[in-house]
Image (tube, rainbow, N blue to C red):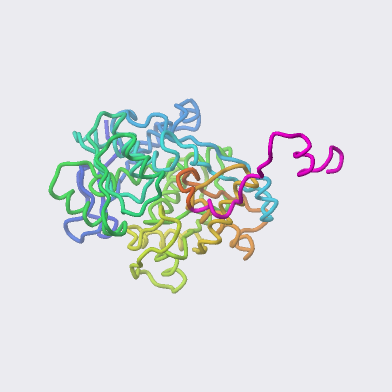
Amino acid sequence: MAHKMQSLVCRECGKEYPTEAIHVCELCFGPLEVKYNYEEIKQKISRSAIEAGPLSLWRYLDLLPVEGQGSIGINAGFTPLIRAKNLGAFLGIDELYIKNDCVNHPTLSFKDRVVAVALTRARELGFETAACASTGNLANSVAAHAAQAGMQCYVFIPSDLEAAKVLGNLIYRPKVIEVEGTYDDVNRLCSEIAGERRWAFVNVNIRPYYAEGSKTLAFETVEQLGWRTPDQVVVPMASGSLLTKIWKGLNEFHKVGLIGPVSTKVHGAQAEGCSPISTAFKQGRDFFKPVKPNTIAKSLAIGNPADGYYALITVAESGGVMETVTDDEIIEGIKLLAQTEGVFAETAGGVTVGVLQKLAKQGIIKKQDVTVAYITGNGLKTQEAVVGSVGRPIRIPPSLAKFEQTFGQPGEA
């Protein structure tokens, strides 16, 4: 029987490689990605088979780059798609949805998807040590999944991360290495270490498999919308990978016959203090000027984005745009989502909501458009960002008279 994974293929020159732990083309140094046998998959996959599958991302096993079953992160994914009526009314969008990965399992961000896939594949390839370069959420997820899998674990993070994300690593007892520098410095170091040690660096040598986990956000969106594609999606960008994989996922569902042609417009959202991809888009360039990040959205703070070029291609193909928001607009976005829909997102979610608001105001997203905003991580991880802008509790002694003095008599309201 033919394998669903045909090969790894260079995204630049098309050279093919075996499905092993390699991520860069030896001819042109282009990035590799998984090439699937869609005809083979098409014979097997169906809406009813997916609907009968596990309540996790592994219901889409036929389109994920593992040979066996999902063995790590078996509860990751299949997060709620919330009909955001209150936020929609505020923004003037009749059919707005929030894809809520704030409640993903086990570490409350979309990274649980990519890590479940990456470490399942790493185990198949015989690795015993998991590692990553991370702006925070990925390290949390790798540490948790490695603990569950009984793997050794090393996570590398910039030295200025939010306290909750540092704690969210240490609790699982990996080796946590704080690197003095930006994420780009951390990533460079990890690339060097990956060349020296047989470790599964999920976003270096295992990257072709790891990145595919993000497609499950697109798969779930389509299924949860009743097997429809949205008209518009807004996706936060760090490396740009998530945005490209959501587009890939939508189109794969069409390729294997589960849905009709895709006409979704894909929009990219970045923080102004680290917006190399959006800046290139606005200036009509297809190359990047690396930037030194300066934003509260630390989970998006990648100054030299690995998939930025492909994010630009995706947005152009889909007819979308890219937009940025300031730190103040990020905080307002976090508060707006919390106060309209009861969802407390981290700073990346504030970026998504802030850009969603801009695109609605600009008329790019129209009233009747079925629109999905991707909220990728939980606000409990980035409390520092909003602690100064939400006020304080009202303090009173335990006295009814004092309460009524403060809030008025019954019937006065």
Q: Which image quarter holds the C terminus?
A: top right
303 left or right of 186 in image? right
Query: 299 or 366, which is in the foreground?
Result: 299
> In which quadrant of the rendered view does residue 180 lie?
bottom left
Q: What span is colored magenta in the figure?
A: 385-413
Q: Position of residue 7 (x, y in %)?
A: 25, 44
Q: Which image quarter holds the N terminus?
A: top left
351 left or right of 240 in image? right
Q: Position of residue 386 (x, y in %)?
A: 53, 52
Q: Position of residue 389 (x, y in %)?
A: 57, 55
> In which quadrant of the rendered view does residue 398 lie?
top right
> Can residue 412 be found in the magenta stretch?
yes
> Can residue 351 be seen here?
yes
Q: Is residue 330 above or below residue 57?
A: below
Q: Residue at 26% of width from left, 51% of height from top?
A: 9
Query: 148 or 374, which is in the foreground?
Result: 148
Query: 12 or 99, which is in the foreground?
Result: 99
- Judged by its main secondary structure, the magenta piece is loop
Q: Residue at 59% of width from left, 61% of height from top?
A: 359
Q: Position of residue 299 (x, y in %)?
A: 41, 52
Residue placed farthest to the left in the image? Answer: 196
Q: Residue at 39% of width from left, 66% of height from top?
A: 276
What is the number of callouts on the image?
0
Residue placed farthest to the bottom in the image? Answer: 283
245 left or right of 8 in image? right
> Can residue 263 be seen here?
no
